[in-house]
Every structure is written in structure tokens, then in C-alpha cells.
Amino acid sequence: MDFNDLRHVGYLGQLSHLLHVNLSHNRLGSVNLLWEAVWGTQLPLVVKLTLSHNQLVSLAGLSACRNLRRLDVRHNLLTDLSCLAEVARMPALESLQLVGNPLCRLLAPAYRLSTV
């Protein structure tokens, strides 16, 4: 579903057995409604979520995903460190990719140490 100029993906709730979801290179601005209304209860098996190259300003709602292991949010519009609090509540998360977000410039050069 990458490179499709998508702004919302409510229809994904019908695909309850997805493990890997790639929504990169679209125009998604928020994952809050997307995750809580659709994925949090209807897509419980997702372990890898790629949301790079979108227009995300927040990661609110993603903590509802208890099985997510890999999250790629590179090259979005994340500016606030509070979004990291959301991913800190994700018990299975093993990999978080943030490169290319404005918040990385705020933390440079040690943003990796700050997020780990």
C-alpha cells in the first residue's frame, strides 16, 4: 500500500491477519484514529509497521499495539519528544526508526542514545 497518496486507511480493519503493513510514501497525517479505531482491535497481529515518508506529526494511539516489534516512522514531521513516550509504552517494540524527523535535529548528535 506504499506510494499510493493515501490519506486514511480505514478499510484495513477487514484484513485481520496482516503481520507486516507498509504504508510508506503516502500522505497520512495521523495514526491516532487509524490505530485506535481500526488496528488496535481489528489488526492485533501486526508486528512490523512502516509509516516512513508520510506527514505524521504524532504517534498517539500506537501504544495500543501490543505485538508491534518494528516501527519505521522515518522522514515524517515529528517534532515533539512526547511522541517517544507513546512508543515507550509498547511492550514488544524492538526497533524504532526516526531518522529524518525534525525531533532528531533537536537531539543531535546523540538522538539515538536519547531514544534508547
Image (cartoon, grey):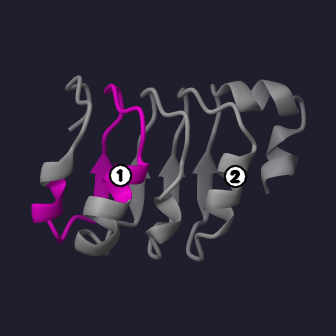
The quadrant in which residue 1 appears is top left
Looking at the picture, does residue 79 appear above or below residue 69? above
Within 10 Å of the Cα at label 2, are there few (<14), some (14-19), or many (20+) other Cα atoms? some
Q: Secondary structure at mark 2?
A: helix
Relative to 40, is 116 on the left or the right? right
For the C terminus, the image quarter is: bottom right
Question: Between 74 and 57, which is closer to the camera in this rendering?
Answer: 57
Which amino acid is tagged 1?
A: Leu
Looking at the picture, does residue 85 appear above or below residue 54? below
Q: Which residue is mark 1?
A: 33
Rendered residue at 44%/69% (across/down): 65
Query: CA–CA distance between discs 1 and 2?
Result: 18 Å
Residue 14 on the magenta segment: yes
Labels 1 & 2 near each other (Cβ < 8 A) = no
Q: Position of residue 59 (x, y in %)?
A: 54, 48
Q: Position of residue 62 (x, y in %)?
A: 48, 59
Residues drawn in magenta: 12-35
Relative to 66, is 4 on the left or the right? left
Q: Position of residue 98 (x, y in %)?
A: 63, 39
Foreground mark, 1 or 2, reads 1
Q: Secondary structure at mark 1?
A: helix
Q: Which residue is mark 2?
A: 84
The disc at residue 96 is: none
Rendered residue at 83%/39% (across/down): 111
Which amino acid is tagged 2?
A: Leu
Relative to 44, is 42 on the left or the right? left
Within 10 Å of the Cα at label 1, are there few (<14), some (14-19), or many (20+) other Cα atoms? some
